[in-house]
Amino acid sequence: MIRLFAAIPLPEEVRERLTDIAIDTPVGRAVDADLVHLTLSFFGEVTEPQGADLHAALLEVKGAPFDLSLSGLGVFGRSRPRIAYAAVLPSEPLMRLQAKVAQAGRAAGLELEARRFVPHVTLVRLSGHRPEAAPIADFVVDENDAVEESVEVTGFCLYRSTLHRDGPHYERLHSYPFGAVRDV
């Protein structure tokens, strides 16, 4: 079994800026710059043949380049925070891409979580710590204006996630570039 997810990779300079912000959090563990991305769909544990079917379905996902805007910070789990993140402004091209990627997963026979897509980039993991809300809330307020980025999305990737004691490790398995026509 392998754990798979589809995501939009971010440019190195954006990942490093976001990680520099995350390192200043008073609690939790900042996500390593190499692991920073925007998840489109988490497929979970799949067999090798299901992974091959998923890859074939993702090859059919078409799109055009578009701009992605990151703006501000947020927290999942307000009273018992689990993740601090950089907020991603929903846009029609992003939401359409996410829907197509999720549909590709279902077409490959995978059961996806029935969770509403909230576009975000995880910066700090608080699992295991489950701190009180005040320190992370103060961090979000203090650093909120530090996150203002615009990124051109030219495709997405399929990743394998392997869980280790020191956190997850990601391996890019396939890239799915868009055509040359910009989506406006």
Image: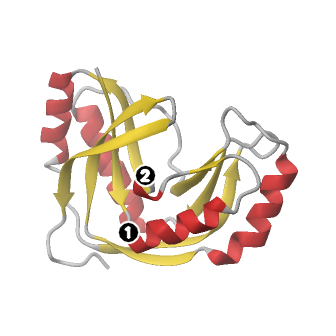
Disc 2 versus disc 1: distance between alpha carbons? 10 Å
Q: Quadrant of the C terminus?
A: bottom left
Query: Is 122 above or below relative to 160?
Result: below
**Which of the pair 83/28 is nearer the observer?**
28
Q: Residue at x 43, y 30 (%)?
A: 163
Residue 104: image x %, image y %?
Answer: 25, 41
Tag 1 residue: 12
Q: Is residue 88 visible?
A: no
Residue 34: image x %, image y %?
Answer: 40, 56
Residue 55: image x %, image y %?
Answer: 17, 40
Going by the numbered disc 1, the residue's amino acid type is Glu
Q: Is residue 72 visible?
A: yes
- Checking the image for residue 35, the label placed there is 2
Q: Which residue is drawn at 53% across and 44% down?
A: 116
In the displayed orientation, state which residue is furthest to the front.
166
Q: In which quarter of the image is residue 131?
A: top right
Query: Is 179 above or below relative to 98?
Result: below
**Which of the pair 99/176 is nearer the observer?**
176
Residue 91: image x %, image y %?
Answer: 45, 68
Going by the numbered disc 2, the residue's amino acid type is Leu
What secondary structure is marked by label 1?
Answer: helix
